[in-house]
Amino acid sequence: MPEMTFSVRWPDGRVEDCYSPSLVVHDFLAAGASYSVADFAHRSETALAIASARVKEKFGFACTSAAATTEQVRRSAASYDPEALVEVLSLHPPLPKDPS
């Protein structure tokens, strides 16, 4: 199962790297996009819940790293105005290019 990291810049300029056990984050966040803190937290938590479920389906147990990242995002988001903007700096690895 491919894993990934996503880097974000919080409203105060702090950069944080986050881990996901699945590339599903690409379905919820885009590199270079900005989201309100509340929307970013919701999108991240949704993606990480799906990622953890995929790990559970494949290996028989939920991913504690996805749970830790969810908690990391919640703690960070709680420090900011929910309407302030979070910028997604990168999603690594990027999705493969469509050859068509």
Image (cartoon, rainbow, N blue to C red):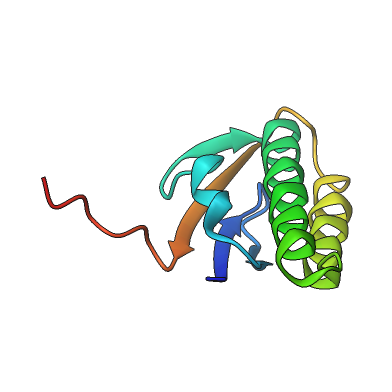
In the image, residue 53 lies at what x, y percent?
77, 54
Q: Answer above or below: position of 79 versus 63.
A: above
Q: Is residue 100 shown left or right of residue 49?
A: left
In the image, residue 60 lies at what x, y percent?
83, 68
Q: Is residue 99 shown left or right of residue 42?
A: left
Q: Quadrant of residue 86?
A: top right
Q: How many marks?
A: 0
Name the residue nearer the viewer: 51 or 80: 51
Name the residue nearer the viewer: 13 or 7: 7
Q: Answer above or below: position of 18 versus 88.
A: below
In the image, residue 1 lies at what x, y percent?
57, 71
Q: Which residue ends up furthest to the top in the rendered image?
A: 83
Query: Image point 59% across, 56% down: which residue?
Result: 9
Query: Image point 69% across, 46% down: which residue?
Result: 44
Query: Image point 52% across, 71% down: which residue?
Result: 2
In the image, residue 18 lies at what x, y percent?
66, 66
Q: Quadrant of residue 93?
A: bottom left
Q: Which residue ends up furthest to the left in the rendered image?
A: 100
**If the image is split into quadrants, where does the C terminus sit?**
top left
Name the residue nearer the viewer: 8 or 99: 99
Q: Is residue 4 shown left or right of residue 11?
A: left
Query: Image point 23% across, 55% down: which residue?
Result: 97
